[in-house]
Image (spheres, rainbow, N blue to C red):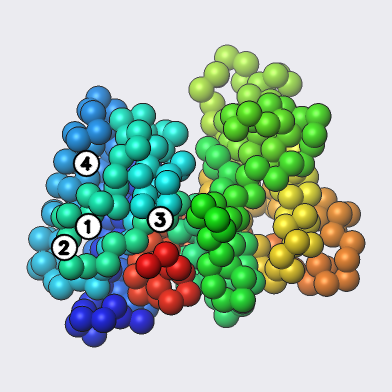
Amino acid sequence: MTEPGAPAGAPALAVDIGGTKLAAALVGPGGRVLAYERAATPRDVDGEGLWRTLAALLDGLVAGAGSPPLAGVGVGCGGPMAWPAAEVSPLNIPAWRGFPLRARFRGRYPGLPVRVHNDAICVAIAEHWRGAGRGRGNVLGMVVSTGVGGGLVLAGRLVDGASGNAGHIGHVIVDPDGPPCECGGRGCLEAVARGPGLAAWARDQGWRRDGPDATGVELAADARRGHPIAVAAMRRAGRALGIAIASATHLCDLEVVAVGGGLSQAGALLFDPLEEAFRAHARMDFARGVRIVPAALGQPAGLIGAAALIHAGERYWNAD
């Protein structure tokens, strides 16, 4: 649905803000990426310097595409954030603490709708709108990477919750006696399955003790090569994911769970133990029909989901 007042077919300006990169795209009403730019997220600037870097990226993108009229601006950003005002304090962007992101975008693009949500929620929106959950009403989208996040679509609409954090499956408890989590709890899915935590566990078991900066993606690559500790790590993550998804499915009566992020690149080494644990714990008849699949959209998913906040706002934006 094109925003009122925008020309038919006008693209959305979609923005994906992360600790490693800033990405932006013009995305058409059908979800097609028409133009794309990215830049490294600067580490040696203050909050205003980071904003200027982002603004220059957006100006270059729009000018390079011929400065078309825009349907609106959709943004995905790491949290935490005060939502829907989108005063953001991303854990992996220390330059921004309480930064008024939505207000800044509104000031830069007056008259256009500006909608900001958590980056993992944008990925979940994309998978429902144009990805692995397309055509289904009840979908959980997950990102398993440096952290574990997600978003929840029920009866065809995004569920925000009281503070915009519904679907945050990373803090479902999968092992009450498990490792401490950065949230202050213990045994959260994120504490067990996030890439850095999993790599740390593997190092404690003897994997790459001389490589303290090794990542979960590298761990997954070693698992594909048959490294026994890396394989065990993938089984550990898969089991935790399966338990969490079983709980979410019993609670929400899901049809599809789409799992993306760097760790999902392990393929069957992650998904086989995930399915095994899910089937062991999802015992209600209605839960057994859920499909747990790899996310379909890959790297552009966050941008496509941010664009859907504009192009399909009747389903994915509930705050105006």
| Quadrant where the N terminus is found in the figure | bottom left
Among numbered discs 4 and 1, the one appearing first in the sequence: 4
Marks 4 and 3 sit apart, C-alpha to C-alpha, by 19 Å
Q: Quadrant of the C terminus?
A: bottom left
Mark 2 highlights which residue? 110
Of labels 4 and 3, earlier in sequence is: 4
Q: Secondary structure at mark 4?
A: helix
**SS assignment at label 3:** loop
**Quadrant in the picture for residue 288:** bottom right
Marked residue nearer the N-terminal end (4 or 2): 4
Image location of residue 104, percent across then percent down: 22, 49
The kind of residue on which mark 1 rests is Arg
The amino acid on which the numbered mark 4 sits, given as a three-letter code, is: Trp
Going by the numbered disc 3, the residue's amino acid type is: Pro
Judged left or right of residue 255, residue 49 is: left
Residue at mark 1 = 106
Q: Is residue 245 left or right of residue 142?
A: right
Mark 4 — residue?
51
Query: Relative to residue 3, is residue 135 drawn left or right?
Result: right
On the image, numbered disc 3 is attached to which residue?
84
Q: Is residue 190 above or below residue 129?
A: above
Between circles 4 and 2, the one closer to the viewer is 2
Q: Is residue 66 among the parts visible in the rendering? A: yes
- Above or below, 169 relative to 197: below
Q: Which residue is at a point 30% across and 80% down the rendered structure image?
A: 2
Q: Residue at x 23, y 54 (%)?
A: 105
Q: Residues within 10 Å of mark 4 (few under 14, many from 20)?
A: some
